[in-house]
Image (spheres, rainbow, N blue to C red):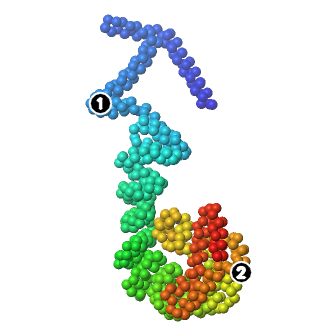
Amino acid sequence: MLLSLIKILAFVAAVAGLTWGAARLTDVTGGAEIAMAGYEVTLGPLQLVLAIALLALLGWLLFKALGLLLALLHFINGDDTAVSRWFSRSRERKGYKALGDGLVALAAGEGEAAMAKGRKAERYLRRPEITSILVAQGAELVGDRKTAEGAYRDLVKIDRTRFVGVRGLMRQRLAEGDTDTAMKLAQKAFELKPRHVETQDTLLRLQAEAHDWSGARATLEAKRRSGALPRNVVRRRDAVLALSEARDVIDETASIEMREKAIEANRLSPDLIPAAVMAARSYLAVGNTRYATRVIRKAWEAEPHPDLAQVFAEIAPEEDAQARLKRFSVLLKARPDHPETRMLEAELMIAAEQFNEARRALGDLVETDPTARVLTLMAAIERGRGADDAVVRGWLTRALTAPRGPQWVCENCHNVHPHWEPVCSNCHAFDTLGWTRPAESGTTLPRGTEMLPLIVGGGVGRAEAPVPAVAEVREAGATASPLPARDAAASMPRTNGDKEMDEAEIVVPQGDKTAARSEAEVVTEGRK
Ligand SMILES: [Zn+2]
């Protein structure tokens, strides 16, 4: 407000000053007489001032024209940008304005506007390495695949932006599910920028999915060199890859190579359970029971796991239950308080028909951690101790709805896997499976819990199934069983349950409408 007032006042003052000056000039007598080449001009004072102003303007114009002339001379000399430079100042200004507007549009999520501004900027600037990025990003924002691909292809042609183009095309192929082409592009991108973390991860994931384990190990090595991963993670991932390599080799029955790879994987990461299992089996294949025992014991010390116990049983498949109990004491002493150790001890005791000792081995697990397996073992113990059928069924009924305990769960998507895999089958992430407890929400059978005692109590329940299994165990325990003890003792009722529950677990978290139906199926299957 004040500023505009001052402006108005200054304008009035200037006009007044000029008028006054002009009036004074007309009052002044005399002037300038210019005589040149026979002509004589007489200028009044006002005319003189105007003439000087006109001269200044002419001088300026001449100066500009000289610049243009100079540019023209350069142009004639061969410098073809000189003229365009002369003319392109305003184009450049417009171009950069369009570019700026495009970036703002991109940030605002207006893809169409970003594309339009990008094209406009390209018309003025002729700099595809910048404008194509804008067009590509805008096109991706609105899902215009074709335009985006065209822009990325333009970027591939320019040295500076080749990586950007390849990465863009790779992401498009990934989104389309064309993993073969995506892998080729990822390899190209990796060549261009070996230290780019996202490219490393994508390539590693694609290679793992394609079972290109040696390629994946090379990528992992590059990742280690660039320092993007902690040392222990690299070792574990390398172990996972070595193990996967070994697993694939098994299919081709090249046993020596498999042994070496499995043993290498176990050496790289002794706590990787599947590696320990495979290494122990490869030692067993050459009759080296001492090394097999050592591998299993080491892994058990790190993380007790039923698969380890199973392989440990395979070391001496012909032994009787007492001998087995004695041999297993190596494992039982390693982690005595771990639930897995206690369950293993109870299973061995059941096989040896020492039911009271089995109950003692379980200890307070029934109260503190009543998983389906613990409760099934309780049923077997009660059965062995000669308890009433109703008591046995009671335990089995509880087992049906109890939490499943630890399983192979993907850390990334929480999908439950029946076996360990290097790549999650659900989200395709690499090395995300851990032996943990899955989230139990929605896995129990809400209506089934109330109904099952009625069903099972009626004498036609699924409790019928495990009873002969337990009887078999007692027979098997007396004679030498070719099967590992835990398989016979507990896994018959358990694996049945696992299968049914796994289905429910996979279906329920997806919010699928079939969830209710699958629950019903579990119940009816149980009733059969
Ligand atoms: Zn997953």
User: What residue did someone put label 2 on?
Assistant: 457
Q: Residue at x 41, y 33 (%)?
A: 89
Q: Nearer the viewer, residue 456 or 404?
A: 456
Q: What is the three-letter code of the residue carrying label 2?
A: Gly
Q: Considering depth in this image, is 98 or 434 the residue closer to the camera?
A: 434
Q: Residue visible at 55% across and 74% down?
A: 407
Q: Is residue 318 above or below residue 114?
A: below
Per the image, label 2 sits on a secondary structure element best described as: helix
Disc 1 CB within 8 Å of nearest ligand 1 atom: no
Mark number, residue 74: 1
57 lies left or right of 372 = left
Q: How many labels were placed on the picture? A: 2
Is 155 placed left or right of 477 in the picture?
left
* Local SS, label 1: helix
Residue type at mark 1: give it.
His
For marks 2 and 1, give the CA distance. 104 Å
Residue at 62% over, 75% down: 403
